[in-house]
Amino acid sequence: MNLKGKTAVITGASSGIGLGYSHALAARGANLVLVARNKSQLETIAADIKADHAVNIDVVVLDLSKVTSGQELLDALKKFKLSADVLINNAGFGTNNRVAKEDRTKIQQEILLNVVTLVDLTTAVLPEMLAKDFGVIVNIGSTASFQPVPGMAVYAATKAFVRSFTSALWGEVKGTNVRVLTVNPGATETEFFKIAEAKPAGKLAPVSDVVEATFKALDSKNSSPSIVVGGQNALMAHFTRLVPVKAVINIAGKLFLH
Ligand SMILES: NC(=O)c1ccc[n+]([C@@H]2O[C@H](COP(=O)([O-])OP(=O)(O)OC[C@H]3O[C@@H](n4cnc5c(N)ncnc54)[C@H](OP(=O)(O)O)[C@@H]3O)[C@@H](O)[C@H]2O)c1
């Protein structure tokens, strides 16, 4: 996929997987719009990337966990006279607590960020992509999307939403040159587990695994609605479909319930 000169909007670009995508997209010649809350981190990243690649980079400092966040990001793009050719809906966080013990505001922000803003941004950029007959929307799911997870009930549900929504959208854009993909990483080496106050269930994979799997899927002529990063994670995701749901919930609970 040739992305030279295209505009890529990456949410959650200040850290982890979003940071990895930002470097990889710049290496392919895409101009970047980096979005997150941490201004100084975004500015440092923009300077680092510009030192390595001749691309334009704009920074949008924005909290994406509000109902109005999607519109605020669109307003910022309009101000820059840009529209998204590539949208990476990556910003997200998880909570690891029993629902009865979790802070309600935190849960609302988790749903607003992981689901509401992701859907709003997707809905906003899609018509122009279809009109141009070119576009890429990558929505970040998780292996948590494949089963209910006691202890991470809301997080897993947000990611199940992302995967279902994005797969349905894949069915809607089929036959056009707009690519829509859910990327489902397993445990990956980022700030995620520290912020979620959770322990990873297995070994952490490098961010490069997620980025490479994404581009492999996007570069493939055979478009698929959803990929799982890592062979073992793909096997586990398949396994959840074969085992009775009660057993799957019990296993997940053993890993994340405390
Ligand atoms: N790491 C894993 O094991 C794993 C596995 C499966 C899926 N994922 C998913 O991968 C995505 C990226 O997470 P990560 O692992 O790279 O974690 P991370 O290192 O914590 O990065 C999260 C990114 O999201 C941004 N973000 C968080 N809250 C935000 C808000 N309210 N408004 C705007 N930006 C916000 C953060 O930037 P600021 O703090 O500067 O705003 C940061 O850039 C998430 O959707 C996560 O659910 C991660």
Image: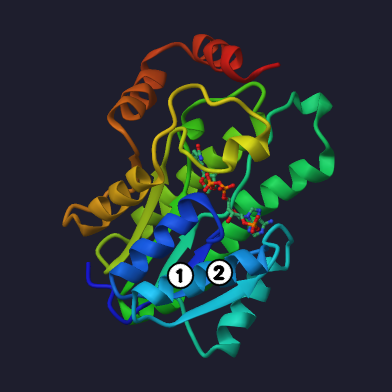
Residue 155 placement (x, y as % from top left):
62, 36
Residue 24 placement (x, y as % from top left):
34, 62
In terms of depth relative to the viewer, which is nearer, 173 or 45? 45
Residue 48, label in figure: 1
Q: Residue at x 63, y 82 (%)?
A: 75
Residue 183 placement (x, y as % from top left):
40, 46
Query: Is the CB atom of the residue marked by disc 2 within 8 angstroms of ligand 1's nearest atom?
Result: no
Task: Mark yes or no: residue 31 visible.
Answer: no
Q: Residue at x 42, y 77 (%)?
A: 50
| Residue underneath mark 2 | 44
Is 16 rendered above or below residue 68?
A: above
User: Which amino acid type is shown beneath numbered disc 2?
Assistant: Thr
Which quadrant is the C terminus positioned in? top right
**In the picture provided, is 221 more to the left or to the right than 12?**
left
Q: Residue at x 82, y 25 (%)?
A: 100
In terms of depth relative to the viewer, which is nearer, 47 or 81? 47
User: Which amino acid type is shown beneath numbered disc 1?
Assistant: Asp
| Quadrant of res 240 | top left
Residue 206, label in figure: none
| Quadrant of res 31 | bottom left
Q: How is the image coloured?
A: rainbow
Query: Is the CB atom of the residue marked by disc 1 within 8 angstroms of ligand 1's nearest atom?
Result: no
- Dot 2: what SS? helix
Q: Are marks 1 and 2 in contact (CB under 8 Å)?
A: yes
